[in-house]
Image: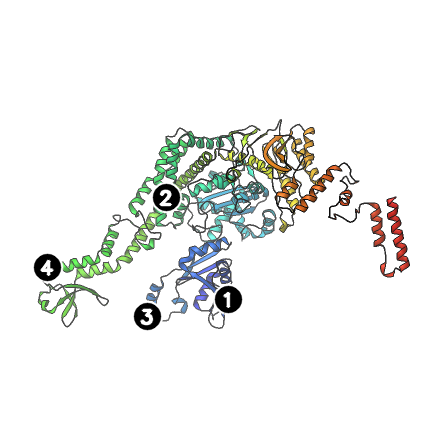
């Protein structure tokens, strides 16, 4: 519908003119006490929000248009639903007070209908990647906006969490950028609209995206945006000057902030480089299969669920980051471990830090709200409480017998002047909204105190005037009154008219009395009538002045938030380590992985009452035991053993103690897993295709310091194909001169146990079981040597398979094992004897690889039945009988 249509009502013209500015966004149009949506927006909103879809008349002959709305005070309830649905939302507010507008135009002539309309404008554009509202954000997750730039020599990536001010950039191969996107999980991704096919080819279609014009992705435009924002002459100070593709991506984010009208961004104080070389490489397969952040089952637990005992939201967000970016540098790892150990050895120190962290709250996001001018009075008081908590934390860290803690303590800034100012200016328990009043403390502003005295003590003051004037004039019947015509007055009965002072001004004559006003009464009237309104205006101004003053402390408070989050994460490690009996690992630069009595940190917390997790030893190096070939029955615990090994390594390299009696971890640079079966049918990829894709990714990126976990490789194809592929992969890992990667290879192919005889660094192990009275007991203990049985039929039985099938499967298995040496031309066991010895089950009709049976089939298929005479049919049947008889002889 055109906004130029003269038949539209003035309000609908206003709506369409604003909608045209952001046609791709859902427009919430403030109309009185409601936010309303119209047209297609109304249809979408009603479906997402579950609100009623109605109609309204546009005016003239334009007909009705769909409409849906909700009360303006419910914005915080409905907006998050729209954002989580991936919608961009433009919020259109009334820029004028309707009452004042009506008063201003009252009596004026010649005004058009548009002139009479309340002015409206888009005050905020909220998108999945740019959100500040607590109701939209997850307090323990970052909310990243990402931008991808397809450069000539590298792919650039930039990430911004506007709610915290964290701004990151980097560049590399498409594979590297895909890994970063997977690890950071941005809520929205920007890219050049001309590169849509490239984006979908390399990064898929799972992200919420926004396409921008190609001119945005130019180095000149990007540098200009960044230098202007940071107020610098170059980007060398941030260490990103050489990252041309990364700079372009970062500039695209700055352009997007302008587009979405997010201009108050002085909390974005730096641009940090993503340093690939400092962190362990974890691909999306590994993060998913190890269940680091999300469990695969709805009622399951992730590793993050188990070890996250953080107190502050920013600590929770930092720990989530640490999980997918484990450290590779031994000194940094040991610094973290040293602090965790210090928490262990000094319970008083630990208790003090824990108590103070409970007072901090989300300091990082509060100071970001200060930057954009959207902080509430309660959040300001919370910021003050956080700064008060910083003081004892700083003192405790500075006196700690640990160099790392002392350095952290020295970096904490008390911001005393700001803390004292908030204490002086803001009431201890203010309302959430400034418009509610009662925000500014008594005693701070004489003007405000006077207005409050007038508002609170108006009646008392009037009684004081009445009493004073009565005593002064001797008019005993004097009283103070009020009416809407001339305000406050002094009423004197006619019997006392002669006592009225000369300075009083008569305003009204009644039958029995007269009413007067005085200069004092008129002055007070002006004060008392406008006191409440002036109080709110003055409080808003004073609060705004405080917010401006607070913005000077943004860099210091951001540093505080980062340090407190760091301490919070390490304290979380100490808590969970003590509760779950974890030990400090020895982390070094060797190639040894030596775990004694290791346990799975997640499974052990979910064991049934009375059961304990069975621990196991794992030893790997690059000289003697590079590859552990692990066989054993299904359900014996092979997968758990693989996962627990990777999790112990990962926990050690993020600085946490580990579930084991002891552990020596030679630092790994990459953790690869091929665990579990899945498919991607929407892209035409079968389970086996996904399995091979993941395996190829491992083999193409493996290094000497990598940890590789393969579980049941080759299940998605035939037995002989699977064995062949598995053998070749293990052989490649062993024989690769450039990468003797430490490897755990769990398999049900017992044939692979033969590899130990031919390759010196491959050692066979099995997860043991015990058979008692035909029943299998899983001991879940890893012992040297290979296993000869899978006990798959037993697993089928305990899974509830019908007894007849279990019985028949056991019969077939025994016959195969007894006749396994008798093989056909194709190298496979012959099956005809099994079919002949069926127990009420017909497995097949013809063994069609038999040449005689193939000839019989061909004779039958060659018959022209429609033209065959009875005699010819009898003759043909006799010929077929001779073929069969000839076989029997």
Q: Which mark, by number, is residue 2?
A: 1
Q: Earlier in the sequence, mark 3 or mark 1?
A: 1
Q: Position of residue 348 (x, y in %)?
A: 37, 32
Q: Residue furthest top?
A: 624
Crowding around mark 2 (Cα neighbors within 10 Å: few <14, some 14 to 19, many 20+) is some
Identify the residue under disc 2. Answer: 552
On the question of residue 403 being in view, the answer is yes
Identify the residue under disc 4. Answer: 471
Q: With respect to residue 673, does 545 lie above or below?
A: below
Label 3's element?
loop
Q: Earlier in the sequence, mark 4 or mark 1?
A: 1
Which residue sits at x=50%, y=35%? 654
Alpha-carbon span between mark 4 and mark 1 = 74 Å
Q: Position of residue 150 (x, y in %)?
A: 57, 46
Alpha-carbon span between mark 3 and mark 4 = 47 Å
Compared across the picture, whether 826 is left or right of 737 comes to right
Alpha-carbon span between mark 2 and mark 3 = 48 Å
Crowding around mark 1 (Cα neighbors within 10 Å: few <14, some 14 to 19, many 20+) is few
Q: Nearer the viewer, residue 18 or 871?
A: 871
Q: Earlier in the sequence, mark 4 or mark 2?
A: 4
Compared across the picture, whether 407 is left or right of 692 comes to left
Residue depth check, mark 3 versus mark 4: number of the one nearer the observer:
4
Identify the residue under disc 3. Answer: 107
């Amino acid at each position: 519908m055109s906004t130029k249509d003269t038949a539209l009502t003035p309000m609908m013209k206003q709506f369409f003119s604003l909608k045209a500015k952001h046609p791709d966004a859902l427009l919430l149009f403030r109309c009185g006490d409601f936010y309303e949506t119209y047209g297609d927006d109304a249809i979408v909103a009603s479906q997402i929000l579950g609100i009623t879809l109605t109609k309204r008349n546009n005016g003239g002959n334009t007909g009705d248009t769909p409409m849906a709305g909700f009360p303006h005070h419910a914005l915080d309830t409905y907006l998050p639903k729209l954002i989580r649905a991936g919608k961009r939302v433009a919020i259109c507010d009334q820029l004028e007070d309707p009452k004042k507008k009506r008063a201003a135009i009252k009596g004026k002539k010649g005004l058009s209908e548009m002139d009479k309309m309340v002015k409206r404008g888009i005050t905020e554009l909220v998108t999945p990647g740019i959100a500040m509202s607590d109701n939209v954000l997850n307090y323990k997750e970052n909310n990243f906006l990402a931008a991808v730039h397809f450069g000539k020599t590298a792919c650039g990536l930039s990430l911004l969490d506007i709610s915290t001010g964290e701004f990151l950039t980097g560049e590399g191969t498409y594979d590297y950028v895909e890994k970063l996107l997977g690890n950071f999980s941005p809520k929205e991704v920007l890219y050049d609209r001309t590169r849509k096919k490239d984006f979908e080819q390399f990064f898929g279609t799972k992200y919420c995206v926004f396409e921008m014009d190609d001119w945005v992705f130019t180095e000149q435009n990007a540098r200009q945006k960044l230098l202007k924002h940071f107020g610098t002459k170059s980007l060398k100070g941030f260490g990103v000057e050489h990252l041309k593709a990364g700079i372009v991506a970062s500039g695209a984010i700055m352009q997007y902030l302008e587009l979405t009208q997010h201009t108050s961004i002085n909390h974005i104080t730096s641009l940090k480089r993503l340093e690939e070389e400092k962190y362990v490489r974890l691909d999306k397969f590994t993060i998913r299969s190890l269940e680091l952040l999300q469990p695969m089952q709805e009622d399951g637990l992730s590793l993050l669920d188990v070890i996250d005992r953080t107190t502050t939201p920013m600590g929770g967000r930092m720990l989530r980051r640490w999980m997918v970016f484990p450290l590779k540098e031994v000194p940094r790892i040991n610094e973290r471990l040293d602090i965790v150990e210090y928490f262990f050895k000094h319970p008083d120190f630990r208790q003090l830090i824990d108590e103070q962290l409970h007072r901090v709250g989300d300091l990082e996001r509060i100071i970001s709200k200060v930057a954009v001018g959207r902080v509430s009075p309660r959040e300001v008081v919370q910021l003050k409480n956080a700064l008060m908590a910083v003081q004892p934390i700083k003192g405790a860290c500075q006196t700690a017998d640990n160099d790392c803690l002392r350095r952290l303590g020295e970096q904490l800034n008390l911001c005393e002047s700001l803390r004292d100012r908030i204490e002086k200016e803001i009431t201890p328990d203010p309302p959430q909204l400034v418009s509610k009043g009662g925000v500014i403390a008594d005693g701070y502003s004489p003007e405000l105190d006077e207005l409050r005295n007038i508002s609170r003590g108006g009646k008392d003051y009037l009684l004081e005037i009445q009493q004073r004037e009565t005593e002064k004039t001797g008019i005993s019947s004097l009283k103070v009154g009020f009416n809407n015509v001339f305000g406050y007055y002094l009423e004197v009965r006619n019997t006392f008219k002669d006592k009225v002072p000369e300075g009083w001004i008569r305003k009204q004559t009644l039958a029995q009395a007269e009413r007067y006003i005085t200069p004092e009464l008129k002055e007070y009237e002006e004060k008392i009538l406008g006191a409440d309104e002036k109080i709110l205006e003055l409080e808003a101004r004073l609060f705004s002045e405080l917010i401006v003053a607070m913005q000077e402390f943004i860099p210091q408070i951001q540093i505080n938030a980062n340090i407190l989050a760091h301490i919070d994460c390490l304290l979380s490690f100490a808590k969970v380590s003590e509760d779950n009996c974890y030990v400090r690992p020895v982390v070094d630069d060797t190639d040894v992985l030596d775990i004694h009595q290791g346990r799975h940190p997640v499974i052990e917390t979910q064991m049934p009452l009375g059961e304990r997790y069975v621990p196991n030893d794992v030893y790997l190096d690059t000289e003697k035991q590079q590859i552990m070939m692990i066989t054993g029955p299904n359900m014996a615990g092979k997968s758990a053993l693989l996962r627990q090994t990777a999790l112990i390594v990962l926990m050690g390299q993020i600085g946490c103690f580990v579930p084991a009696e002891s552990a020596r971890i030679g630092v790994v640079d990459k953790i690869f897993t091929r665990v579990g079966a899945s498919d991607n049918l929407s892209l035409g990829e079968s389970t086996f295709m996904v399995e091979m894709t993941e395996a190829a990714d491992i083999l193409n990126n493996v290094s000497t310091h990598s940890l590789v976990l393969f579980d049941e490789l080759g299940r998605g194809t035939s037995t002989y194909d699977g064995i062949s592929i598995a053998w070749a992969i293990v052989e490649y890992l062993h024989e690769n001169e450039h990468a003797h990667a430490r490897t755990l290879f769990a398999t049900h192919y017992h044939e692979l146990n033969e590899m130990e005889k031919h390759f010196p660094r491959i050692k066979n192990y099995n997860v043991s079981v015990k058979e008692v009275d035909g029943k299998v007991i899983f001991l879940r203990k890893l012992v040297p040597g290979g296993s000869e049985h899978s006990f798959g039929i037993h697993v089928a039985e305990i899974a509830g398979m019908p007894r007849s099938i279990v019985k028949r499967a056991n019969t077939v298995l025994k016959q195969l094992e007894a006749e396994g040496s008798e093989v056909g031309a194709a190298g496979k066991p012959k099956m005809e004897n099994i079919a002949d010895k069926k127990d009420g089950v017909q497995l097949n009709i013809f063994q069609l690889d038999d040449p005689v049976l193939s000839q019989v089939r061909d004779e039958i298929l060659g018959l022209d039945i429609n033209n065959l005479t009875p005699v010819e049919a009898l003759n043909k049947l006799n010929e077929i009988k001779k073929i069969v008889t000839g076989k029997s002889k």
